[in-house]
Image (cartoon, rainbow, N blue to C red):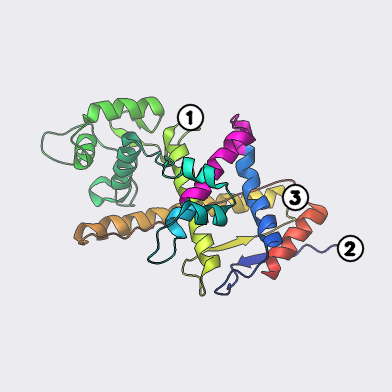
Amino acid sequence: MVFQRPSVFLMSKPRAKLPFSEETLQAMLVRVLRPLVKLALASGFNFTAFSAILRRLYIEVAEKEFALPNKQQTDSRISLLTGVHRKDVNRLRGQEISTSLLTVGVSQTSRILARWLADPLYCDAADRPSALPRNTSDGSPSFESLVSDITKDVHPRSILDDWLDRGIVVLDEDGRVQLDLSSIVPNAGDDARRHYFTRNLRDHVQASVTNLMNDPPPYFERAVHYDGISAALAARLDALAREEAMALLLKLNKVAHQAIKNDPGGNSRWIAGLYVMTEEGETGLQADAASKTEADE
C-alpha cells in the first residue's frame, strides 16, 4: 500500500563547493532543460540551431566569468574550459549574443501599470486601481495625467486606443477608463509575455545557481508542493495561491513605489517573483521518486 504524504520542499544548505558529480549535474540539467527543449521544438528551433547558441554561450561565459585574475583570457584556455575547438573559439569569440527583448512599449506599459496599481492618486479607498476619466480640466487624476507622469513621448490617446484594442482597459458606462486586472497577464502573442518569460526565468535560474554555489545561500527561494492529490483540491489550492500571490505582489509594488520617491538611486536591482502551477500526469513510481528526492533535499 502506498501512503500519500504531504511534502514541504525547502532548499537545502549547500556546501561552498558544488557538492555533486558530473552524473548528478547531468540528471539535474536533463530535468531543467526538458521544458526548454519542448519550447524549442514547438517553435521549429532544431538541435543544430540550439547547439550553435550553446556553443557561443559557453565561449561568452568562459571569457567573461572564468578569467584568471590579472591574466588575459586566451583562446586556448577558453577551449580548455569549454571543450569547444580553439578554431571555433577564435572565430566566435567577441560575437555578442543579443539578449534584450525589452521594447519601449513593454517598458512604458509596465511602468504605467505599476503607477496605476500603487499610487494613492490613482487608487480608491480599498487600494484598488480607480476608474479614471480620460482627462480633466482641474488637474485632478485622469488617464491622461497617469500616462503623462510616465512619458511625454507618446500621446495618452494613442496609449488608450492601444490598450482598448488589447483589452488592458475598458470604458465603463460613464466613459471612465477601467483597468482589467486580468490583463496584467499578457496574451501569448504579446511581446510582453516573451520578455517576462525570459527575464523572470533567467532571474530565478540565476538565484538558484547562486544559492547552489554559495554557503550560506544568499537568496530566498522556497516552495511548497503536495503530490498525489485530487484535481478538485489542486484547483482549490491553485485559486487560493493565485489570490494570495497577487495580493503580495501588489503590496510589494505599493511599498516600492512609495519608497523609491525618496531613494537616492544606485546600481542595485531587486525583484520578487512568484509562480503557481498545477500539473497532471506524474503518478505512481515517477511521482514517488520525485517526491522522495525532493523531500531528502
Q: Position of residue 215 (x, y in %)?
A: 52, 74
Figure check: 166 above or below 100:
above
Span highlighted in magenta in the image: 39-60
Check disc 2 and report its element: helix, strand or loop: loop
Check disc 1 and report its element: helix, strand or loop: loop
Report the front residue among 143 and 26: 26
Image position of 98 (left or right of 232): left
The earlier-in-sequence mark between 2 and 1 is 2
Label 1: how many residues lie within 10 Å, few (<14), some (14-19) or many (20+)? few
Q: Residue furthest left?
A: 138
Image position of 11 (left or right of 262): right
The earlier-in-sequence mark between 3 and 1 is 1
Q: Residue at x 59, y 40 (%)?
A: 51
Q: CA distance from mark 2 to mark 3?
A: 18 Å
Dot in front, 2 or 3: 3
Label 2: how many residues lie within 10 Å, few (<14), some (14-19) or many (20+)? few
The amino acid on which the numbered mark 1 sits, given as a three-letter code, is Gly
The amino acid on which the numbered mark 2 sits, given as a three-letter code, is Met
Asked if the magenta segment contains residue 47, the reply would be yes
Label 3: how many residues lie within 10 Å, few (<14), some (14-19) or many (20+)? few
The residue at which mark 2 appears reads as 1
The residue at which mark 1 appears reads as 189
Check disc 3 and report its element: helix, strand or loop: loop
Cβ atoms under marks 3 and 1 closer than 8 Å: no
Image position of 67 (left or right of 262): right
Q: CA distance from mark 2 to mark 1?
A: 47 Å
Q: Specify the label residue 78 is tagged with.
A: none
The residue at which mark 3 appears reads as 282
Image position of 246 (left or right of 126): right
The amino acid on which the numbered mark 3 sits, given as a three-letter code, is Glu
Asked if the magenta segment contains residue 129, the reply would be no
